[in-house]
Image (spheres, rainbow, N blue to C red):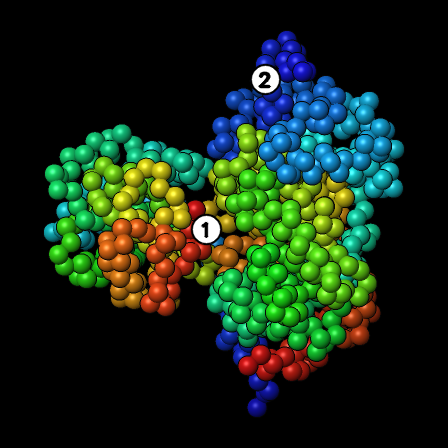
Amino acid sequence: MPDYVSAFHGERHRFADLREVLAKASPRRSGDELAGLAAASDAQRVAARSVLADLPLRVFLDEPLVPYETDEVTRLILDTHDAAGFAALAHLTVGGFRDWLLSYEATPERLAELARAITPEMAAAASKLMRNQDLISVASRCRVTTAFRNTQGLAGRLGSRLQPNHPTDDLRGIAAATLDGLLYGTGDAVIGVNPASDNVTNCIALLEMLDGLRQRHDIPTQTCVLTHVTNAIEIMRRGAPVDLVFQSVAGTEAANTGFGVNLGLLREARDAALSLRRGTVGDNVMYFETGQGAALSAGAHHGIDQQTVEARAYAVARAFEPLLVNTVVGFIGPEYLFDGKQIIRAGLEDHFCGKLLGLPMGCDVCYTNHAEADQDDMDTLMTLLTVAGVTFLIAVPGSDDVMLNYQSASFHDMLYLRSQLRVRAAPEFEAWLERMEMTDRAGRIRQLEPRTARLLAGPADAPA
Amino acid sequence: MPPPDPWERLRAATRARIGLGRVGDALPLKALLEFQLAHARARDAVHAPLDTGAIADAIRPAPSVIVTSAAPDRPSYLRRPDLGRMLDPASRAALAGHETAAGYDLVFVIADGLSPIAVRHHAVKLLRACVTRLAGWSLAPAVIATQARVALGDEIGECLGARMCAVLIGERPGLSVADSLGVYLTHAPCIGRRDSERNCISNIHANGLSYEVAAELLAWLMTEARHRKLTGVGLKDDRGAILSERGHDRLE
């Protein structure tokens, strides 16, 4: 049992266990304060970091934060750990691991080889010893590509999820928002609707409308209705067009139980989606969302800080080879991430941990109206994430999600990021935009008069 | 005659901000300012204090008690939902003075929640529409609560000896609606009730559910709850009206 005592610069601090070291080493955030886990002072926070830095990296293999016997996420993490790959890291402390990640030795190839040797707790621990620029630097070297009807995650690319939600799932309203987004060249990652009603018949109507739109214009993208995995299984059983199976996941078995899922159920859903063989350039059929605070709000965090338990959710996700994963970083509210500063930090941490673990990590850059955040904070986060090589971002019309009542990035924001940071949509999708005469010679999205856009020729009348 | 703008027809199908146009890659200034105004209104709705005296005056001659949660101010309320679910000691004492031997059939709690503006606009009118449908019920004094979450009604109901509690509370403001009111009904309120033990009616505002429709539904739920001795997932609205189980997510 390691000793969790710090005498950093003459101040003595003692920590009860590994969970306390991790929690107190975390940057200040309201969710850890709410859980009673946060450092009592800034000095104690730094002391915890100094203790964490000196721990051997393998402590996370020897001392599971949630018992192996009672938690299937812990079992998944340890049973699928790449012990042979870990041999290259086994001599390191957590601090040494952080330094190695930042060294020139940590090339994209080396990081990809080591992804399965790194556990979520190792990634989270290293992140606590990193500044924002460190999180960006390392994440930008992690390359994760996935594919379904197009390829996500290639260098120099930024995907976008077109999120055309409507408060009553009105098919015309959702089609209108989808067309709006397509005219900005968004939607290569997925055209994904959060249904207002989880009713299976309703979800099938949405899927059929989106699939019809996709087929009519031969769009090389995938569609998704973000309903519970058990609904997706039923929807597939009824023969409706399911490209991607969606599920929210969390980092402990108990929190996943709160979501009504377990690993077996996710496996069953993935098998069903694979059997449909709807992908053309790849067969990554899963889409997961996560977010700091989910485990605590379910009372299922086991005394672990919210960032570390969030990283454990990525172990769940990577077991199912997803096309897309994103953290919904500011959605849960100020009791978990209080303001723009906390949301920005959490977004960068989640992206870093996800990428390091080998996930196609995206982000819903977002906030609610009771958080201390605004569009300026979102501009900062989306710019930083794109510099960090984020796989995709979520975009809604004019940043205003009229169903979920929060603010996300906009279609305009995707244009800004492409111009400013020279990133592009997935190659297959980009070729489609050219075929549709939606791009100019410089590759920018043309500002089309609605009546001249080929996309608007019919679909406005399509869903009756 | 110029050809019709296709966005006109599409806009009729959704409140979403579609067809905004562009200046380069950016949002045109008019759309930017409209967004900023909507966000400002939503934030103002969260932070505006509830004028509890005005609510008490508006419901007179019916009696009322003004209480506050253990969250001392708005920043604490936003950071610590647990404090918003507990009464402060002085408020607990104030409620104890209203206990009666027979107890009450029902207590209405008017709670600021995340939109005091919603309470100011809709709570009293909704309360009146409900009370006229509850002839024969013994009503506790209405409790007006600030820095309050839904579950504060559990402790209030317990203190007063009420057999049922209806919390009228401001819902989390969105850009399109900043003054939406929700109602949470809990049978046998006591500390520790789970959210699955409540029924919710949400989206009560000028363009949402009307006072009359909401009051009719609430009165039906109350009658059923008294009869079946429960609220929550075991009490579905089998009249086929709107009963949102998602309302709680939006609020908390």
**Secondary structure beneath disc 2?**
loop
Q: Name the residue: 20% across, 40% down.
A: B161
Which residue reaches farthest bottom? B1
Q: Which residue is mark 2?
A: A15
> In this rendering, would A433 be left or right of B209?
right
Picture coordinates of residue A220 (x, y %)? 76, 68
Q: How far is the residue under mark 1 from the one under mark 2?
A: 35 Å
Q: Name the quadrant containing residue A223.
A: bottom right
> In this rendering, would A306 be left or right of A428?
left
Residue A362 badge? none
Res. B158 visible in picture: yes
The foreground one among B62 and A254 is A254
Q: Name the residue: 55% across, 41% down.
A: A255
- Looking at numbered disc 1 in the image, what kind of residue is underneath it? Asp
Q: Name the quadrant containing residue A4.
A: top right
Q: Eyeballing the image, is B45 above or below B79? A: below
Q: Name the quadrant containing residue A278.
A: bottom right
The foreground one among A141 and B213 is B213
- Looking at numbered disc 2 in the image, what kind of residue is underneath it? Phe
Residue B249 badge? 1
Picture coordinates of residue A388 (x, y %)? 74, 44
Crowd band around label 2 with a 10 angstrom C-alpha radius: few (<14), some (14–19), many (20+): some
**Secondary structure beneath disc 1?**
helix
Res. A378 visible in picture: no
Q: Eyeballing the image, is B177 above or below A249? A: below
Q: Name the residue: 64% across, 38% down.
A: A73
Q: Name the residue: 66% across, 82% down.
A: A457
Picture coordinates of residue A348 (x, y %)? 67, 41
Q: Subunit of mark 2?
A: A
Q: Quadrant of the N terminus of chain A?
A: top right
